[in-house]
Each structure stands twice: as structure tokens, then as C-alpha cells.
Image: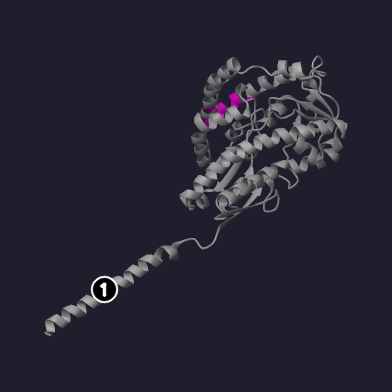
């Protein structure tokens, strides 16, 4: 064997050895880069642990945890566990929390236009129609623009359209607009401006603090949200009068929020699951609300001796008039507020005309089956 042949064989062996090491490294590289174990996220809601709203937050987390097969695990803490309820946006934006569950109106102090996702009459839309605007009418893009304008490092998913909220809980029925004057009243968002203009002395408090404030006389009246939340939080213990129907929060939704850096670092598959879980939880929340709210509405009357009254039309009409004055002023001060407002109005004009022309009123059917003439109806 010649020296040249030996050199060629040695070179070939060295090449094959190097290639084998490289191949092994190539196989090992993905394993080295792969996530070891599940991705854990710590969240907080803006609700007390006993509130059905915190239950909704837990429902969403469970959907994600189950749908990812445990690859992503979200733990949800109640309001105050890490930060106060109104501190959620800052905490998620700064990464103190990985995400959270609340409502956009709670960030009203950061940017007044955030209240347009639910604080007001919705321009004759209900909350589900406002969600349609958000998904398909430009709202999603406007919300991203809005959060960017205030430097919020978050990804937001509005979801869970809520039924119309009551005017609130009072010491006695409210019969006219003047009855609101001088009342120490709790509300949030643009409703602060609306009720202030109607003569109330407004105090914005998180849900978990309202009943205690009413019990101590710091509030004369208050609104929160729905029969189940109000009952669990203890409103029937401090008031026996609830006024139903109002335009101050006719079309509100919840918000699921992620820290943007944490969200962007997730694999595309998990991002897709998160988005799908938002829509699934939105539907489930709506159905659960109908079941639970109607039960507690009935039981508050039969067991808690609460009297419910319809808000007089004169008050409802005045709410609309004052709301128009408030948003006109804010639109003049805030170009982004104006842009979002106009987008909603354009969508609402088309959507509500379709709804009013198409959807049959249900009052006649209700009276037929359950009203004075239908109470004894047998089928």
C-alpha cells in the first residue's frame, strides 16, 4: 500500500468521524433547545374569589390547560393576591403577572377610549353586537393601536358579552332624574362622567369593596353587574331595592390579557389554542350566565326579599342625552377616542338596522306563555 493510499483512507475516516459527530449534534440540537416541561403562567383576575366573574376566569384557564394537554398551565389568583384590581394592566404590562382577567373599563384612567368597549349604550347594539364590531368592524386593530399609544406591553382578547346591567341598588326606588342628585354612587368608566352630570357624587370602587362601603354609609347606592355577582357579593344584605335596565353599561365584555413578550415567545400552536379557547370560553360564559343569573334573580325575590323595579324611561332618556354630551367632549379632546367612536357608530348603524328589521320582539311570546293571560297555559 502506498503512502498516498494510506493518506486518502485516513482522510476519509476523519471525514466520516466528523460527519457522524455533526449528525449526532444535529439530532441533539432540537432536544437541547426544546422547552423542558410545561410553560407556567401566573395570572390574576380583578374579581374576588367568590364572584362568578372569577369563576369565568378559572373556566378560561382550564380550557387552555386542557386543550394544550398541560403544555401551558395558567394559574389564576383572585383580585388583590398580587396587585389591586385596578392595577392589573400595569402588572401585566411590566411582567409582574403573565396575564389577567378583567374588563377594559377598569383601565379608564390610562386612556378614556378604553371605556368604549362596554361603558355606554352601545349605540343600540347589545354586547354581542359590539363584539362583532371588535372582531370584524375594525375594533381589534383600534384596540391594538390604543394600547400601543399608552405603551402597554400587552395582547388583549375581549370576550364574554354581558347582558344589560342594572341601574343599581338603592335605599328606595328611583322615580325621576332628580332622585339621583346628591347620591353617593359607585360606578366606573365613562359612567362616572354620565352619573356625575346627572347629579350623583360618584366614587369608583372595585367590585369587592362596594358592599362594605354601602354598609358603612360611604355609598348611598351602587351598580355592579348582574344578579349572581350582586347576590354573592352581598348586595341584598345592604339594600332591598334594585333598579333594572340602564344604558350606562349596556354592551360590556370581559378582557383576557397576556404580557406581550410572554405571549410572543409562545409556539404558534399554543397561540392558536389560546385564541380558540377565547371564543369557546366566550360562548360558554354567555350560556352559563343565562342559567346562573336567572336562578339568582328568582331566588333574590323569593328568599332575600329583594324588590326589582324597571328604571323609568325618563331616566333612560336622560342617560342617552348626557352620554352624547360626554363623548362629544371626549372626542374633541382625544383623536383616538373620536376615531373609535366613529367606527362604532358606522358599524352600529348597519348592524342595528338589520337587527331591528329582522329579529322578532320576544315580549309578545313571553306574555303569551308566561304573562297574565298565559300563566295557566297548558301545552
Image x and y of residue 4, in percent = 12, 81
Which colour style is shown? Answer: one colour
Quadrant placement of the N terminus: bottom left
Q: Quadrant of residue 221?
A: top right
Image x and y of residue 217, in percent = 85, 38
> Relative to the observer, which residue lies in front, 351 or 291?
291
Q: Quadrant of residue 349?
A: top right
Instruction: For mark 1, give the secondary structure.
Output: helix
Q: Residues within 10 Å of mark 1 (few under 14, many from 20)?
A: few
Does residue 185 appear in the picture of this structure?
no
Along the horizontal axis of the image, is 3 left or right of 192? left
Q: Judge whether 43 appears above or below 203 on screen.
A: below
Q: Which residue is located at x 63 percent, y 44 percent?
A: 101
Residue at the disc numbered 1? 16
> Relative to the observer, which residue lies in front, 273 or 179?
273
Quadrant placement of the C terminus: top right
Is residue 37 within the magenta segment? no
Residue farthest toward the front in the current orientation of the protein: 379
Image x and y of residue 361, in percent = 67, 17
Along the horizontal axis of the image, is 341 left or right of 183? left
Q: Quadrant of residue 116?
A: top right
Q: Main secondary structure of the magenta part?
A: helix
The segment highlighted magenta reads 326-338
Does residue 214 appear in the picture of this structure?
yes
Q: Which residue is located at x 44 percent, y 64 percent?
A: 31
Along the horizontal axis of the image, is 333 left or right of 52? left
Amino acid at each position: 500500500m502506498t503512502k498516498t493510499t494510506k493518506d486518502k483512507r485516513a482522510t476519509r475516516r476523519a471525514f466520516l468521524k466528523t460527519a457522524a459527530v455533526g449528525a449526532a449534534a444535529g439530532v441533539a440540537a432540537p432536544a437541547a433547545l426544546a422547552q423542558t416541561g410545561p410553560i407556567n403562567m401566573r395570572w390574576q383576575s380583578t374579581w374576588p374569589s367568590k364572584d362568578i366573574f372569577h369563576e369565568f376566569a378559572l373556566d378560561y384557564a382550564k380550557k387552555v390547560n386542557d386543550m394544550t394537554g398541560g403544555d401551558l398551565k395558567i394559574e389564576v389568583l383572585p383580585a388583590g393576591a398580587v396587585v389591586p384590581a385596578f392595577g392589573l394592566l400595569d402588572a401585566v404590562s411590566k411582567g409582574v403577572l403573565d396575564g389577567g382577567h378583567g374588563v377594559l373599563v377598569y383601565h379608564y384612567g390610562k386612556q378614556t377610549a378604553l371605556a368604549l368597549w362596554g361603558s355606554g349604550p352601545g349605540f343600540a347594539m347589545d354586547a354581542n353586537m359590539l363584539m362583532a364590531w371588535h372582531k370584524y368592524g375594525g375594533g381589534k386593530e383600534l384596540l391594538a393601536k390604543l394600547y400601543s399609544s399608552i405603551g402597554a406591553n400587552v395582547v388583549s382578547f375581549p370576550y364574554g358579552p354581558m347582558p344589560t346591567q342594572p341601574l343599581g341598588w338603592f335605599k328606595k326606588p328611583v322615580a325621576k332624574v332628580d332622585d339621583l342628585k346628591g347620591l353617593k354612587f359607585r360606578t366606573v368608566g365613562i359612567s362616572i362622567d354620565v352619573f356625575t352630570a346627572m347629579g350623583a357624587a360618584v366614587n369608583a370602587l372595585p367590585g369587592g369593596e362596594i358592599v362594605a362601603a354601602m354598609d358603612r354609609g360611604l355609598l348611598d347606592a351602587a351598580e355592579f353587574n348582574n344578579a349572581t355577582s350582586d347576590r354573592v357579593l352581598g348586595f341584598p344584605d345592604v339594600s332591598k331595592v334594585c333598579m333594572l335596565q340602564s344604558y350606562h353599561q349596556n354592551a360590556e365584555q370581559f378582557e383576557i390579557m397576556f404580557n406581550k413578550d410572554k405571549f410572543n415567545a409562545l409556539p404558534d400552536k399554543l397561540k392558536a389554542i389560546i385564541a380558540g379557547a377565547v371564543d369557546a370560553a366566550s360562548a360558554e360564559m354567555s350560556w352559563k350566565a343565562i342559567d346562573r343569573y336567572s336562578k339568582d334573580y328568582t331566588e333574590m325575590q323569593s328568599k332575600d326579599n329583594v324588590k326589582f323595579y324597571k328604571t323609568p324611561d325618563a331616566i333612560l332618556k336622560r342617560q342617552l342625552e348626557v352620554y352624547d354630551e360626554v363623548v362629544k367632549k371626549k372626542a374633541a379632546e382625544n383623536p383616538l377616542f373620536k376615531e373609535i367612536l366613529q367606527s362604532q357608530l358606522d358599524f352600529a348603524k348597519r348592524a342595528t338596522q338589520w337587527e331591528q328589521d329582522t329579529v322578532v320582539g320576544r315580549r309578545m311570546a313571553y306574555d303569551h306563555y308566561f304573562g297574565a293571560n298565559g300563566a295557566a297555559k297548558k301545552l
